[in-house]
Amino acid sequence: MYDFDELTAFADVMTTGSLTRSAQKLGLAKSTLSRRISQLETRLNQPLLRRQANRLIPTEAGLLFHNYCTELLAMAAHSQEALAELREEISGEITLEVHGALARSWLASAIDAFLNRHPKAELTLHTRETPPTKMHSNSVHVWLGPTHECGLNQERLGHLTRGLYASPRYLAAAGTPHHPDELNQHAWIDLLGSASDGLLLIHQEHGQYTFNPPRSRLRVDLTALHIDAIARSQGIGLLSHWFTAKREQHHPGELVNCLPGWEPVPLPITLLYAYGHQSRRTHALLEFLRSQVPAQWRTSAATV
């Protein structure tokens, strides 16, 4: 077994190249520091340092062992932090970034429950309309839609299925389509980027149809504005069944699925967070978010 005082002494001298500077930095007598390094060399049966002019430089064995020494000290520090966290309440700042479509419909009430459970935690919530791209992030992200490699761990929470919706008032005036090839005869309400390359609609009995939406007179970049525009009889648009059902609880009868059975590929919902050791508060938030996933999201995932 290694003595961590000896490892610390060796690692610091490797950084400074000087017994004097390292002794001052560590608050030790120079003789004590020298003795610890000598004891480590005896333990390894290898010289680790040699003097050249006024500096101590590593031998070949010293260079090799320094890598292992650094790893051992890092592991010791992490273990101490982990044990310390077990003795503490979950507290401190956490940042959660979530797709704007999920913020109010799902997260608002869930966050209240998290803060009530952990009264010393401080949560900063950001909504975003673009997926995270940073290689390193101290935030937890929940994203709706496709993701790309961004250096973060990506964990699938579920999927949202979607359909074509309109208001009964719009359909009464413009007629109800019976097949996707009739959609070009209707006003299309576009959520930016949702169908710019064509929309592949799939029906279990009638196969596939690629719908190329006409130019929309109303294009929005927020899900709430999108669903409201469709409810106000502006036209037909693509909506999540789950979002629509939530809205119908408060505004019944304002939206109907006008082409039942015709659906695009479900949208994935992804939890993104940094690799490696997580602080206790981050781990608590991740576990909480997993526990709050609606059953409908997982049911949708099973059918993908």
Image (tube, rainbow, N blue to C red):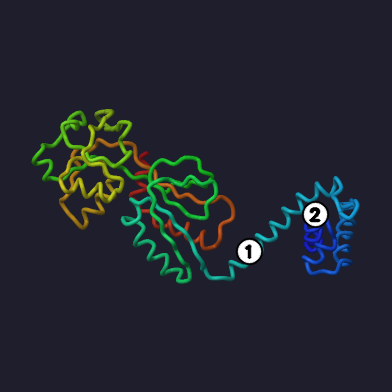
Residue denoted by label 2: 14
| Residue 9 is at least partly visible in this image | yes
The 10 Å Cα crowd at callout 1, few under 14, some 14 to 19, many 20 or more, is: few
Type of the residue with mark 2: Met
Q: Position of residue 217 (x, y in %)?
A: 21, 39
Occupied quadrant, residue 263: top left
Q: Residue at x 81, y 62 (%)?
A: 21
Q: Residue at x 52, y 52 (%)?
A: 137
Residue denoted by label 1: 81
Q: Position of residue 141 (x, y in %)?
A: 45, 52
Quarter of the C terminus within the rendering: top left
| Residue 1 is at least partly visible in this image | no
Please tell me whether residue 244 is drawn above or below residue 180 in the rendered image: below
Type of the residue with mark 1: Glu
Quarter of the N terminus within the rendering: bottom right
- The reply, left or right, for residue 287 in relation to residue 53 is left
The number of callouts visible is 2
Q: Position of residue 35 (x, y in %)?
A: 89, 63
Question: What secondary structure is found at the residue carrying circle 1?
Answer: helix
Nearest to viewer (mark 1 / mark 2): 2
Question: What secondary structure is found at the residue carrying circle 2?
Answer: helix
